[in-house]
Image (cartoon, coloured by chain):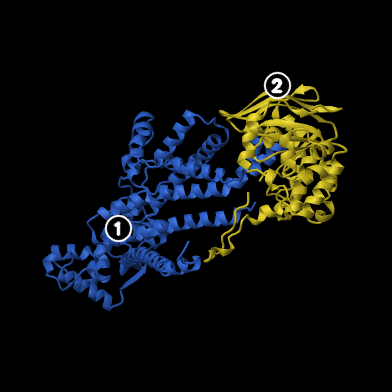
Chain colours: A yellow, B blue
Amino acid sequence: MTMPVMTETIPDNSTAPEAPAPKADNPDSAGRMGLDEFLEQATDLTDETVGTVTCDHPFMVADDVNVYYGDNHAIKHVSLEIGKKEVIALIGPSGCGKSTFLRCLNRMNDTIETARVTGTITLDGKDIYRKEQDPVALRARVGMVFQKPNPFPKSIYDNVAYGPRIHGIAADRAELDEIVHTSLERAGLLKEVKDRMDEPGTSLSGGQQQRLCIARTIAVNPEVILMDEPCSALDPIATARIEDLMDELCEDYAIVIVTHSMQQAARVSKRVAYFHLGLLVEVDSTDRIFTNPQHKLTEDYITGRIG
Amino acid sequence: MGNKLTTSEIVAAGLARRRRKETTFRLLGILATAVGVLFLGVFFATLIAKGASAFKQTFVQLEITLDAEVIAPGGEIDLEYADFDGLVRTALRSRFPDAKSRADRRELYRLISVGAGYQLRDLVASNPDLIGAKQSLWVPASSDVDMLLKGNIDASVEEALRTMSDKQIAWVESLENSGEIRSEFNDALFGNGDSRDPELAGIKGAVMGSFYMLLVTIALSFPIGVAAAIYLEEFAPKNRWSDLIEVNINNLAAVPSIVFGLLGLAVFINWMSLPRSAPVVGGLVLTLLTLPVIIIASRASIQAVPPSIREAALGLGASSTQVVFHHVLPLAMPGMLTGAIIGMSRALGESAPLLMIGMVAFIVDVPGGFTDPATALPVQIYLWADSPERAFAERTSAAIIVLLGFLLLMNLAAVIIRKRMERKW
């Protein structure tokens, strides 16, 4: 929806435009619809997910997951398998529940008091919402990178060393140094920071901070990394570096990334899940989703027919 | 649209009005600030004008014979019962032989403070070899003489209407002319406890009382307040009970302080049988008073810690206690300390609750501990302001200056701590 910007009122209306300029540029403007209209199509939605929710080597399996924030049913009957060593992208319009679903995977929703999760999510065959499961132990296995780079107001070294320290991963100082170095190296940051490990992490640039956060996450050696729009606050160059990094990291970790950029989803992921109003509409390989989407809504969304 | 004005024309038409409004508002702002500064200036000016003279005190030089017969009758030094005042009187009589009648002599004696006798006693106690010798000593003048010389007694007023007689004024003038009177820094004001005699009255007792009280207050209210704030903010479930507690904490901050005094009287003194007039009870009462302030300030500074830091730590697998102690607390600490210091300075200036627990008593001895009878600076000010002697007026102002000095120091400390410890994120 592009609002015509009124800079000055034209006194004579002889040049009144017949159609707004933006529409004229768009060849299939006839099929274009407003966001409200698009969202209204939810009434046609069913709980059925189109495509294949399963994968070859499932590592995390969500089965019939529902999330409620108080009375708000934020996620409805979502079932999805996440494979070992694959990058899966969650896409969809804002408020569709993709971040909520992501936060279910390491129980970050536990911190929201009104949030309630039903259904099962298993990690390596074990339910992560079972009583004996300590969320602390879970989050050591399922790390998370957030939308805004959020380094601790501590030194670069301490930022990366924090996770290993609280979990007692390193036996001594030498081992901790080793972990910090390898983590920074894997995050592609070591060269830039190796002479300034004592400087505060907040003194780095935005892209460096986000890579520091990734280094901090992999220092704990998790099995799954959740990324919640990790590049939305970064410039294209920093974004490209993070995307390259994801390519490397997926050799060892399963990565679940929430993104608003279709190009990013196409570039980094092997599979794509399209969420809409709390429903998982379609899941398939990235190629199929972007070349031959099965569901009308998916097609509308990825071809940019909303807005 | 027709005969419509362009946007820029509409804007231009309203511009003058907008500017006028802005100017008016600015002028009002300047006016308000000026009024505030003026009041503050008047307050400080009168305070200093009235109180500055109290930092000086008049002393009189006397030739005193430390008569062995008086101090050590029968060869034994008797500091407790020896008539040191008598020695001072003898010295006065020999300086002014014209005072013959009993009435005259009584007036003469009133020129010198009773502190002169104490001074002699202390001198002899520290140096017994002086017994028998003649000493030229500067002893404190009475507060009337002090007031006369500071211009607070008007000699032109009819004799019956002033505290000093014509004869006394003549004697003082005679001392002045011979250089036997001088003005010195008022050590007594800072070194003594309270006294009925203004020239001997000091604030040391009150300062120490306030010090012990604040020690108790900070030792209790800071840890309790911070712990309560952390629990309420980070761990307590958000339900009707925690809402109720929050509302009540906010209400407690607004409860008149005298109510806390009554509570202290009922609970700490009547029920727990703690000593009356003691700094420990004062500290407990002030703890009740400052707790809500500290809890509110601490909660605000905990809330100011960005949630992204918490999420980052949680996402790495930190437990909630680790999140609090590794990340939230260090970031919130400057705000908590500032809140605590501001709470302390409020406690330092509080007098009403202390009246209820007996800290308003006239206490001469400087307290040496938490259970010694004591008073506090603001209460001392209240007591002195109530005293009829003219010389207490300037001492009241001086005590206020000292109290304000302490408050200024504490608030300065709060600012410095905030600037030093504040970390950017």
Q: Position of residue B105 (x, y in %)?
A: 17, 64
Left or right of B343? Residue B189 is left
Residue B328 sits above or below residue B420 on the image = above
Residue B69 visible in the displayed image? no
Q: Position of residue B408 (x, y in %)?
A: 45, 58
Work out whether residue B159 or residue B240 is closer to the camera in this orientation and state it: B240
Q: Position of residue A176 (x, y in %)?
A: 81, 42
Residue B50 visible in the displayed image? yes
Query: Which residue extends farthest front?
Result: A14
* Residue under label 1: B84
Work out whether residue B138 or residue A196 is closer to the camera in this orientation and state it: A196
Residue B363 sits above or below residue B15 on the image = above
Left or right of B50? Residue B250 is right
Left or right of A121? Residue B280 is left
Q: Secondary structure at mark 1?
A: helix
Q: Residue at x 38, y 50 (%)?
A: B349
Left or right of B243? Residue B323 is right
Q: Amino acid at mark 1?
A: Phe
Q: Amino acid at mark 2?
A: Arg
* Residue under label 2: A130
Q: Residue at x 36, y 52 (%)?
A: B193
